[in-house]
Amino acid sequence: MPPPPNPTEIKVPKPSLPASIAKPPKPGTTSEPKTVGEHANKGGVSAVSWIDERMGQSTFLRGFMFRKVPRGTNWFYTLGSAAMFAFLAQAVTGVFLAMYYDPDTVNAYESVRHINDNVFLGELVHGMHKWGATVMTVLVFVHMARTFVFGAYKYPRELNWVIGVVLLMMTMLMGFSGYLLPFDQRSFWATVVGVNINGTGPIIGPYLADFLRAGTEFSATTLARFYAIHMLLIPGLIAALMGLHLYLVAKLGTTAPPWVKPKKEPKANQKRI
């Protein structure tokens, strides 16, 4: 057998470069952006690629946005998205109202009147927030009714149904806590009646009423507590539960309407007589 070759004498071939890299392109033939729009488009693509390389969101978004939709899907399936849009509208208008609202028993009513009379587009934003609460409540109720009628609460979507019920209660509580904020005669006495009704509940009723009143009687702290619940506690819980709700919808998919029957596949290997 001949001896093995000396490693220092082995000649490794140099890798050949592609023609596009080995030969530089001629001037004027490059694909560099020429217009402002092309520069902006290239910059946007580069920024998105830079973020996606570090966060890896393209796979999640691809699975979230491009998924199978059952036959018979109709406009009833948009009620959940409409309720989410109503919540986002409430959040945006609520932020602008909070810039001028004063959660004080002396100045609360005057601050609301100032928003409606003096602030630019204040009456429009206040009206959107006020009537948007009713719209959101109606949409959530109709969405829950659609889910029940279509049987979308059954296996394996029981957890999503429970989250939806909690979201319904959070929506009602957010509307109840926001009703006191104008602090006029109607909102004050309506809140008194509502808190007293909660106080009649079994076991936790009296403790819940004391928590809402921030004591045994209505005071200035009651308005501040309702404001904190309405602005911070309830929206945070709704946003978290809504994110989990959407995740389960994307993971488990949606159900077909009960009147749509699955297609029967032809049986294979049937013997003919």
Image: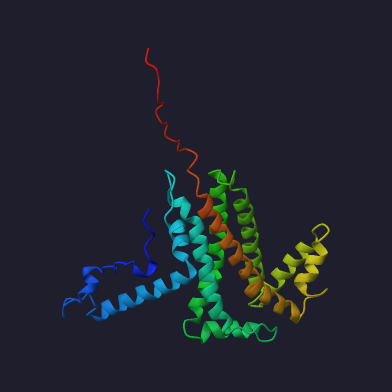
Q: Is residue 260 left or right of residue 96?
A: left
Of 192 and 175, nearer the camera is 175
User: Quick one: which residue is furthest to the top in this view?
Assistant: 273
- 107 vs 206: above or below: below
- 5 vs 109: above or below: above
Q: Split into 4 quadrants, where in the image is the C terminus?
A: top left
Colour mode of the rendering: rainbow
Residue plotted at (62% across, 58% down): 168
Q: Is residue 121 left or right of residue 234?
A: left
Residue plotted at (23% across, 73% down): 22
Residue plotted at (53% across, 44% down): 150
From the top left corner, tell me how far across and down residue 257 is, in percent.
Answer: 48, 42
From the top left corner, tell me how far across and down residue 103 is, in percent.
Answer: 66, 82
From the top left corner, tell me how far across and down residue 154 is, in percent.
Answer: 59, 43
Q: How many marks?
A: 0
Q: Is residue 232 left or right of residue 258?
A: right
From the top left corner, tell me how far across and down residue 104 is, in percent.
Answer: 69, 84
Of 173 and 37, nearer the camera is 37
Residue plotted at (44% across, 70% down): 53
